Image (cartoon, coloured by chain):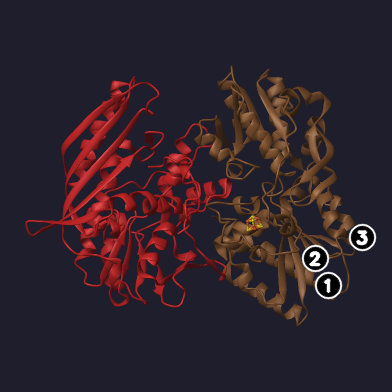
Amino acid sequence: MPPITNMDKKILLAHGSGGSLSHSLIDEVFLKNFNNPFLSEKDDGAIVEIGGTRLAFTTDSYVVKPIFFPGGDIGKLSVFGTVNDLAVMGAEPLYISCGLIIEEGLDRRVLEEIALSMAQAAQIAGVLLVTGDTKVVEKGGADRIYISTSGVGIVKKDLSVKGIEAGDRIIISGSVGEHEVSVLLAREEFPFRSQVTSDLAPLNRLASDILVVDGVKFMRDPTRGGLATTLNEIAEGIGLGIMVYEDKIGVSDGVAAVCELLGLDPLYLANEGKMVVVAKQDCTGEVLKRMRKNPLGRESEIIGEVAAELNGRVCLRTRIGGTRILDMLAGEQLPRIC
Amino acid sequence: MKYIDEFRDRDLCLGLAKKIESILGDSEVTIMEVCGTHTMTIFRSGIRTLLPEPIRLLSGPGCPVCVTPAAYLDQAIALSEIEDVIIATFGDMMRVPGSGSSLETQRAAGKKIAVVYSPLDALNIARNNPYKKVVFLAVGFETTSPSVAVTAIEAKKSGISNLYLLSAHKRIPPALRLLAEDRDLNVDGFILPGHVSTIIGVNPYLFLAEEYGIPSVICGFEPLDILQGICMILCQLKGKRAALEVQYKRAVKNDGNPGAMALLNKVFIETDSEWRGLGTIANSGYAMGEEYKELDAGEVFPLEEMPSAENEGCICGEILKGRKIPNQCPHFGESCTPYSPLGPCMVSSEGTCAAYYKYG
Ligand code: SF4
């Protein structure tokens, strides 16, 4: 991991991108200060045991801009985002808390719309919003509204990168990049409009559909930093390489067009309703069958495999048959997409 | 996507790679792709891994961010210090180190810096902030400069008087002449930037074949285009001839886009320009012309001459000239990475060092 060379200076937007700089910040600031065995797992959440019950526990903050975008809004995102973090930890999400930071002057109707959206999202995902807190800051002290949610759920199956071996297959539940592109296009600075809708969705049912399959070893939702970053995190966690096939990774026409225009790489774009699964090769048929039965996993595909030889790196077999390294996201792609 | 997918067809590409191998035989050939967009396609699609060993692909000076000198960034940074100035810039410029700071660091320190995707966005910022002075960092080749010209014309026409341009626009052909003259370089063929040609046409490149005897092909940006371009160069070399050929026929007309050229000539005048790593090249840049002087940030904001320094030991210049590859730089991957770049070649998404680092 590269060192934070501007340690003595300022926090940059890139430190929040979910890419390499975010990782260094976690290592060099947070792990150093609050080190404990739970945190050093560096997962999206922690698994804690209380009275013999294993609980998954996670927290996340949402600062998406704009707060309404095609396919969702900050409220729905804050519920589904946390539900998904719990789901991919192999847990059944149960209870959610929410903290709101509101800028003075926000239209009351906007707040009501967001609250309604959170309630509906909770209902769809089958979780309860059980506690919350509201703070209002002066005009300019925040940008409209920020939401922070935490969630707990009961662990149904222990998943860990540690069980992953060479030969395991990588599966993704559908095409990539829709969330980030939809948010991007909703920003006023973008002059063109397009038909891209965020993939925002709760993944708990899809996850529980496949948890029962024995060979499912690990799941992760490729949010900030996209598929490429998730694959790199997996590779780093297991010390093995991963080979993925570009032509197997779905990219919708709308996302592809925006990427061409703006020079973005869809593999680094955030998703909010997709799941990456690592499974033993001999059970991939069963996993795919189950995933494709669920509307959220209809386009599930095997996109790659874990490989011992690649020196712990993630490599991409390109569409034209060449090979290249797929590195972790460097620097800022786009800030405030979740 | 339709249309583009055809140019990424695996069987066609592999077929061309085979053909390249058979034409090449066992001769060694060095080809320079001049443009950063070509470099990116080559790395992103893994073309190098398809080509036989004896073909050496060198990346040239065609990444606009990489050739923008530190002195220009220092100016931009100094402008961002002025109370009522908003800097509008393409995102790629944010992390390029100047002598001391970068725009990214300036933004974190609270300076007003807006990332835009088109110069017209800068015009909108100016329109929406009538009491601020908006300075657009006008960098790029002949592909970008026409849209900047349109913006300047539009600003004047609609009476927006708070938009200024800091022009570091560059012209590709004079830089190519410098490379062609470089005796150490030994380039056997040039892959020339297709989108620059859609503007300037083909004639400005004729000298490469006619005066220097170097086979040159104006190429599109998809993997298939590039492989085909390499094939065309090899055929010329094999036939012992040197010509300027157009592979990118679907977009390039012989006389380019006269309308866009007229806009360029209306707003800008040719001027000597400093290229990072290559030095000052005669007539290789665009400055604001007489009629548009009032938009020239360099004139409107008197900035003191500052001594500016390139990072010591950064060999971007040698790399841009194709004399060295990034692995030969002692900083590469050590003290210089995309996370904390020392030189511009590591910053720009089209930079050669960044491409080597990311896609190795
Ligand atoms: S690796 Fe860094 S320091 Fe070396 S030439 Fe490239 S940009 Fe310059």
Q: Which mark is residue B189?
A: 2
Q: In which quadrant is the N terminus of chain B drawn?
A: bottom right
The chain carrying label 1 is B
Closer to the N terminus: mark 1 or mark 2? 2
Residue at figure coordinates x 57%, y 61% from the top left = B333
Q: Which mark is residue B237?
A: 1
User: x, y percentage for residue A249?
Assistant: 44, 61
Label 1 sits on a secondary structure element that is helix
> What color is chain A drawn in?
red
Residue at figure coordinates x 21%, y 61% from the top left = A209
User: With respect to residue A269, does B297 lie above or below?
Assistant: above
Q: Is the CB of the residue bearing disc 2 within 8 angstroms of ligand 1?
A: no
- In this picture, residue A285 sits left or right of residue B128: left
The chain carrying label 3 is B
Q: Residues within 10 Å of mark 2 (few under 14, many from 20)?
A: many
Q: Is residue A208 visible?
A: yes
The chain carrying label 2 is B
Residue at figure coordinates x 31%, y 41% from the top left = A61
Q: CA distance from mark 1 to mark 2?
A: 8 Å
> What color is chain B drawn in?
brown
Same chain letter for marks 3 and 2: yes
Q: Nearer the viewer, residue A239 or A217?
A: A239
Q: Which residue is mark 3?
A: B210
